[in-house]
Amino acid sequence: MTVPIIIAIDEGTTNAKAVCITQNGEIIAKGSVSLTISHPKAAWSEQDPNEIITAVSSAIDQALAQIPNADVKAIGISNQRESILVWERATGKAITPLVSWQCRRSAPFCETLAKSDNASRVQIKSGLPIDPLFPAAKLRYMLDNLTDGMSRAESGELCAGTVDTWLAWNLSGKQTFCTDVSNASRTQLFNIYTQSWDDELLAVFGIPKACLPNIMPSSGHRGETLGFDNLADGIPLLSQIGDSHAALYGQGGFSPGAIKTTYGTGSSLMTPIAELSQSTDFSLGRTVAWNDGALSYALEGNITHTGAGVGFMSKLLGISDLSEFSNLAASTKNNDGVYFVPALSGLGAPHWNSKSRGLITGLTDNSSPAILARAALEAIVFQVADVFYLMEKMGGVKLDTLLVDGGPTRNHWLMKLQANLLQKTVIRSLTEELSAMGAGYLAGRALGWWSSREQLASLKRDIEIIEPTSKQSDLINSYAGWKEAVERTLYKTN
């Protein structure tokens, strides 16, 4: 007897994962392959596109090996967002690296644009602040630095796409060239009001439309597998969605008032909103959440360095084991006035300052490795709080509960610190593959397994509830000190 499943791919920055999901929403098998990232210059980050395809294939093989009688009904894709590459349409060969969302190589272009008359129009139409995080400026840099890059893009000889597009292209044997509205809305070339590539935005960044993929809903048929390693041909590709959006969907956070934080290398806070505003405050991005048959929008705050900041500090302290690092941090009662602002390649939301650089402040002759470890972990909860409070203000909806996911949420001490600072209940998903679940849910909607968001919301989810304790004056005072430390970082660039 066969087992009907959906394969949900989650291609992240550090790992490529594949999970097998049944119709009751249960993960019954999974595979994961680690990925490398290189830094050829200071503040540059890139990955090998071919390594990503190989890793995804291996992750799928690992998962399917656990279910010999699997009947693969569909494939869904979740992906790291804002990373982009260029490949040849005729050969399918990547001719650039995947320029990572972390990469700041397009900072000079963004600085010039931010000072120009086009800045406000770009922000209003795209819903996004002007920052090297977003792919439009990265793509301009790439085309400018490829031999005949611009002319080849104009002729349609070259394809440009985010990771979801690259995966769909390879899974389909070069037959499917598309992205979804969530990923398109993160490029800064997409008009969030018209739901299309915008001619004015394309002109500002100098990007030919001919090299860009078709835009699809997040859920729905967009091609079939063809010639992809060990997968059978003809399996429908039924979803694409950015990983942060997918995590919110997987958590069941469908309505205004829900908010989730995905903690990882960087972190993302996202909350659904009822409608788009014409606000000129771009401290938070306005983005498409998904289109699962109905279009949903969201506010989002992207924090550039959270887990990455901890990784940086752990190297400085010579501690490779993260559990040891966390235990060291938790051994102190407070931070003793020491703060670490992990602006290692600038600050993201809500400051959007690409020139800011990392800062450790408050050091004395009593400062210890434990204090520095605590400062690195506190930087995570402080940055999340910065965005949370602004999100509540801009969204105009009281946020009572924080949904959380991602590797760092396994650290109970860290999540308790987050709950205590916000004085909000934190609900941690015990399903680590939440972004994959979101992609799987969307594929299942298109497959007919689930007919509505309400049906998805009723599926069993394994969670841990972390309640805040009474307000702690030390923590509140520490947060005030954090704000002062951030101001010092910003002051250096003004």
Image: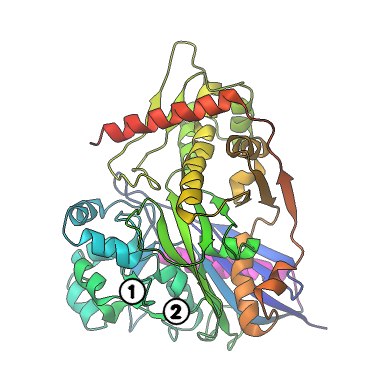
Q: Is residue 139 left or right of residue 482?
A: left
Locate residue 224, reporting x and y percent: 54, 86
Which dot marks residue 421? Answer: none
Query: Which quarter shows the C terminus?
Result: top left
Q: Nearer the viewer, residue 320 or 446?
A: 446
Q: Residue at x 66, y 35 (%)?
A: 413
Instruction: Specify which label sits upstream in the sequence, 1 or 2.
Output: 1
Which dot marks residue 87? Answer: 1
Q: Nearer the viewer, residue 86 or 425?
A: 425
Locate residue 181, reporting x and y percent: 44, 74
Locate residue 176, reporting x and y percent: 45, 84
The vertical placement of 91 against 28, above or below, is: below
Q: Residue at x 46, y 38 (%)?
A: 309
Q: Does residue 54 belong to the magenta stretch?
A: yes
Q: Residue furthest bottom?
A: 234
| Residue assigned mark 2 | 169
Q: Circles 1 and 2: CB distance less than 8 Å? A: yes
